[in-house]
């Protein structure tokens, strides 16, 4: 029997765990990304490859060390390097003497049956209906995880005793490794939500609100973004993450496969600045930045890995969005040389600036209302 592994990307490992457990697939969850994961990837991947490719090479090596012999990952299309990832990674692993099987799940437009058939080629002798049920359960888990994260972002910014949300979320991520089946994961999520809701919060504070946009891996994987949601939340900032695993599955797998992916809100919002999809998540970055401005957010942070082509294009557009819609934008570019201290300092300075900006705006509003 195959022992399947996959890239580590935030909550993806919990979602895939739910899928593979419901389909009786033997799998190895890649160990959480660490300095060693990055060092392995940096050592064996080409120097100018994007950071996610390097971290994923490290993930695969660590999973192979634990016994994995098959790698599953999604494939990409469009004008960026993601489409080459699997081939490059296969060659790197081959050079290192790991002759593993690669299954690339490219998303077949307008043909959900074809997508399920591809999953079937990994899971073996299971009926299409069983696979479809597994996909449905995993999607439910992914969407519940998105909701749990959103709740933690709201509570963390308002908690009276700092660190409580972090502690509960850490406990959740530890416990979820041990539970079996999608049903048990969903139950654990529900219990964790109850624990979060029981945290004492300061109802009088109106926290700053910051939207996170950018390249999907750096937005979603906490190791790559130095746990930016916790950094901001601990400073009393409420975060919204524009990209999430559940939302990504709905938009880019299910709706895409069903041909229902027209007129997405971010595409409409991005239109005056970026009319077409240029690869990666550039159009989402621009569109979501516009929508955050329209929703009254205090600022936006764009995250992307060094040399990410689509996000470089988005970065060149964001100053115009920022001026047109009066929303401050901070861009953080991450690579293996990024130091946490400098990264934190930039975030702290941005939050400080947003805080002063908000106080000034409130003072101006009060002055106008007072009729002076
Ligand atoms: S989106 Fe950016 S980081 Fe991801 S593969 Fe494309 S160029 Fe690399």
Image (cartoon, rainbow, N blue to C red):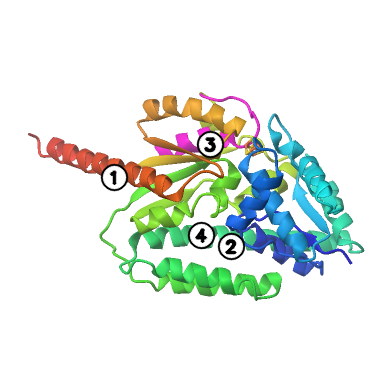
Front one among 77 and 288: 77
Residue at image position (55%, 29%) is: 312
Q: Secondary structure at mark 1?
A: helix
Using residue 150 as the reference point, say whether residue 201 is left or right of it. Answer: left
Mark 4 highlights which residue? 149
Q: Secondary structure at mark 3?
A: helix
In terms of image quadrants, where is residue 204? bottom left
Residue 45 relative to residue 203: left or right: right
Inspect this view and state whether residue 94 appears: yes
Q: Residue at x 40, y 35 (%)?
A: 329
Residue 44 in percent (x, y) is at 71, 46
Residue 283 is covered by the magenta coloring: yes
Q: CA distance from mark 1 to mark 2?
A: 33 Å
Between discs 4 and 2, the one toward the N terminus: 2
- Label 2, secondary structure: give it: helix
- The answer to whether 319 is drawn above or below residue 59 in the figure is above
Give the magenta-colored segment's residue range: 273-297
Residue 144 numbered mark, or none: 2
- Judged from this view, the residue extending furthest toward the left is 372
Q: Which mark is residue 285?
A: 3
Query: Where is mark 1, residue-wise?
Result: 352
Relative to 278, residue 235 above or below: below
- Of callouts 1 and 2, the N-terminal one: 2
On screen, residue 335 versus residue 165, left or right, reads right
């Amino acid at each position: 029997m195959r022992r399947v592994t996959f890239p580590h990307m935030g909550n993806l490992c919990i979602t895939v765990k739910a899928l593979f457990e419901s389909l009786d697939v033997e799998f190895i969850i890649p160990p959480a990304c660490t300095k060693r994961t990055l060092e392995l990837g940096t050592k064996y991947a080409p120097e100018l490859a994007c950071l996610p490719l390097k971290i994923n090479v490290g993930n695969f090596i660590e999973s192979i060390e634990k016994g994995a012999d098959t790698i599953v990952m999604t494939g990409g299309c469009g004008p960026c390097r993601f489409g080459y990832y699997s081939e490059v990674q296969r060659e790197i692993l081959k050079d290192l003497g790991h002759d593993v099987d690669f299954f690339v799940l490219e998303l077949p437009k307008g043909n959900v049956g074809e997508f399920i058939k591809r999953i079937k080629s990994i899971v073996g002798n299971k009926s299409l209906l069983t696979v479809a049920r597994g996909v449905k359960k995993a999607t439910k888990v992914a969407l519940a995880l998105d909701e749990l994260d959103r709740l933690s972002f709201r509570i963390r910014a308002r908690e009276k005793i700092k660190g409580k949300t972090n502690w509960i979320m850490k406990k959740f991520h530890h416990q979820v490794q041990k539970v079996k089946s999608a049903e048990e994961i969903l139950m654990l999520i529900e219990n964790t939500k109850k624990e979060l809701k029981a945290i004492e919060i300061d109802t009088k504070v109106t926290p700053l609100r910051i939207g996170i946009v950018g390249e999907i891996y750096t937005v979603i994987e906490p190791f790559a973004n130095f746990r930016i949601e916790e950094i901001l939340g601990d400073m009393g900032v409420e975060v919204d993450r524009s990209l999430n695993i559940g939302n990504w599955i709905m938009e880019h797998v299910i709706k895409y496969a069903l041909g229902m992916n027209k007129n997405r809100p971010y595409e409409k919002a991005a239109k005056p600045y970026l009319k077409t999809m240029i690869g990666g998540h550039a159009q989402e970055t621009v569109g979501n930045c516009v929508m955050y401005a329209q929703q009254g957010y205090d600022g936006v942070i764009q995250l992307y890995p060094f040399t990410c082509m689509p996000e470089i294009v988005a970065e060149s557009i964001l100053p115009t969005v920022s001026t047109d819609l009066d929303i401050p934008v901070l861009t953080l570019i991450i690579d293996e040389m990024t130091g946490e201290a400098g990264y934190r300092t930039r975030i702290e300075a941005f939050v400080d600036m947003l805080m002063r900006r908000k106080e000034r705006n409130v003072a101006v509003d009060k002055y106008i209302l007072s009729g002076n």
